[in-house]
Amino acid sequence: MNDNTTSTSEIVSVRLTLNVAYLLNGEPAQDMITRLQRMCEHAIGHGMLTGDSAAEVDEYTIHVSVLPAPLPEDAIAGFMRQRIEDGNLDAEDIPTRLARYGLMAPDDFIAEMRERLETAEDDGAADLFGGQP
């Protein structure tokens, strides 16, 4: 915040979701991730998020990563059903888990479910991915 901002200024938090599919043409993926982050920082530093207004960017976070491969819904449902049937997930815990999973960032949820599914497969459960990685 700059020195001209009064303590009564209203702050609004906004999320911008931008998915980019690059045709790499020989460029390393990590270089493109780095470039994308730098371009976003450049835009912020040069007023491109506020345009011709008196508003200022108070604070921001940037997270640039490669999107995880999606998980099939039936694999997740089957995994949860199996945990309930095996007695590894009590009915009383289901509302808490629903709330927790619903509030997670999608990438975090996919990562956690993928890890749990892979652990279950390593422990001898059926192929929960349906033949998918």
Image (cartoon, grey):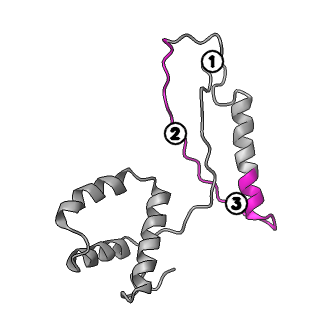
Q: Earlier in the sequence, mark 1 or mark 2?
A: 2
Residue 84: horizontal and vertical position, in percent? 22, 74
- 129 over 73 or under it: above or below: below
User: Which range of residues does the magenta coloring cover?
Assistant: 8-34
Instruction: Report how far apart the C-alphas of labels 1 and 2 lie in the structure.
Output: 19 Å
Residue 93: horizontal and vertical position, in percent? 23, 61
Q: Quadrant of the N terminus?
A: top right
Q: Main secondary structure of the magenta part?
A: loop
Instruction: Report how far apart the C-alphas of labels 2 and 3 lie in the structure.
Output: 22 Å
The residue that mark 3 highlights is 22
Neighbor class of circle 2 (other Cα within 10 Å; few <14, some 14-19, many 20+) is few
Residue 24: horizontal and vertical position, in percent? 76, 64
For residue 70, the mark is none
* Residue 16 falls inside the magenta stretch: yes
Left/right placement of residue 101 relative to residue 15 reads left
Q: Amino acid at mark 1?
A: Ser
- 35 over 110 or under it: above or below: above
Q: Amino acid at mark 2?
A: Arg
Q: Quadrant of residue 23?
A: bottom right
Looking at this view, is 42 or 79 the one in front?
79
Instruction: Give the residue drawn at x 70%, y 60%.
Output: 22
Label 2: element kind: loop
Which mark lies nearer to you, 2 or 3? Answer: 2
Neighbor class of circle 1 (other Cα within 10 Å; few <14, some 14-19, many 20+) is few
Q: Quadrant of residue 61?
A: top right
Instruction: Give the residue drawn at x 64%, y 30%.
Output: 49
The residue that mark 1 highlights is 53
